[in-house]
Amino acid sequence: MTLVLTGAAGLVYWRIETALDSQLDEDLAAYQQTLDRAVRNGQDLPAGPNGSLRQVLDTDGRVLRSSAAVRDQRLLTPAERVAAAHGAVVRRDIGALLPITDGTLRLRAGRVTADGQPRIVIAAVQRGHRDEALRELLAQLALASGLTLLAASYVGYRAARAALRPVERYRVGAAALADGADASPGLRLEVPTDRDDEITRLGDTLNRMLGRLAASAAREHQFIADASHELRTPLTLMRAELDVALHRPRTAEELTETLRAVDAETRRLVTLANALLDLEQLGSGERIQRVPTTLDRLLDDTCAQYRTAAERDGRTLTGTYDHATVRVDPRWLEPAVGTLLDNALRHGHGAIVVRAETRDGRLSLSVSDEGPGFPPDFLPHAFDRFSRAEASRTTPGAGLGLALVAAVAASHGGTARAENIPPGTTGAMGAAGVKGTAVTLDVPC
């Protein structure tokens, strides 16, 4: 603001100074023309404007005629006198605007020929009124600029405070969350809904960030709770088996049995840890890597790993799917399908059918079997972590398989659903009158 006011004041001063100088120069030029004519004609020197002075010199600098105020005072320097004698027009100011002094003049000198002799005619006017007007103008501009600067500073300060008040409120809210995130996990910043400016958008961005931080903290707490809950049982069993084995001497057969029990629990721990880590990796927002994948090849390779186990149980495993290329992440889609096949082998009955089709840029993939179906009260919680139906609690597993399937579908921007196939309908297997279960993934591809 200081620069703007200084520039504006400088422009006003320059315009007024130019106007005053132009008027003064016009008066001075007209007066000198009158003097030149009088000297050339040998007449008396005429009086000029109020406060004007005049002087006539020869080329050697001797004063021939002069106003009483200057008498023998030489108004030109030797260099200026020589320049005027050679025909140049000399213009000069005597005295400065500041500090205030008396006798400030503006003069103009030129050569004139009189009676065959060169003469130097000097016309001068006083600058008192012009300088006084400019000094008054400087004082007024300084006063006006100072008051304007104070007013602008106050208004600007208040406006900046008002504009930045929401930012300070956001900072306080974020600091409160940082200092006590566990105490207030649902903290959100108050963002106006009736405005759409930079500050409001900043608040919305911070709220999205806080939401992601809260979700990350919730996932961390859930991971710790799940791990501590599920790891405690196998670790306790392993500790009990080892304590019993070390309590008294054991035979080789008893030690072997103990080692087998410990090995089983160790395998369970490894499976559980891998499942938890996979879920955490998907839930942490890791970007999946979509690559062109041949659908039938992916499913053929996955089904081949479980077909032998199905045949050993006297069951069939067949696939019906499109020969299409889809953009998915096979690192996650393949284990998700494998989890569904493993569940069908362990908890289902009869034939297992894998069906996949692409339509309108989406992939629908389902695995169904002829089992007894999900309990009705279990279906709403089928994809929750560690959620297991009562009938499956006697079989190995931690209840993380369907949770992993749902996480894979969500990471692809899709959904997963579990359903029972009642008799008399055409289920996921495409056959009527078949009772069973089906789990379907629907993802964009």
Image: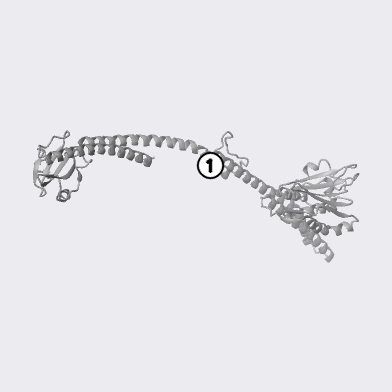
Label 1: few (<14), some (14–19) or many (≥20) C-alpha neighbours in 10 Å: some
Where is residue 273? Give x, y as percent.
73, 55
Horizontal side of residue 303 vs 204, given as left or right: right
Task: Give percent across and percent down for residue 331.
Answer: 73, 56
> Pointer 1: what residue?
171
Q: Quadrant of the N terminus?
A: top left
Q: As rendered, which of 425 and 86 lies closer to the eye?
A: 86
64 with respect to 225 (left or right): left
Res 147 seen here: yes
Q: Nearer the viewer, residue 3 or 378?
A: 3
Compare residues 240 and 44 and report the one nearer the observer.
44
Q: From what the image shows, is residue 220 above or below residue 33?
A: below
**Hey, what amino acid is under mark 1?**
Arg
Secondary structure of the residue carrying numbered label 1 = helix
- Give percent across and percent down for residue 165: 50, 37
Q: What residue do we see at 74% from left, 57% from top? A: 270
Q: Is residue 396 left or right of residue 158?
A: right
The outermost residue toward the bottom is 252
Q: At which x and y percent is residue 220?
A: 66, 49
Residue drawn at x 38%, y 40% is: 4
Residue 243 can be seen, yes or no = no
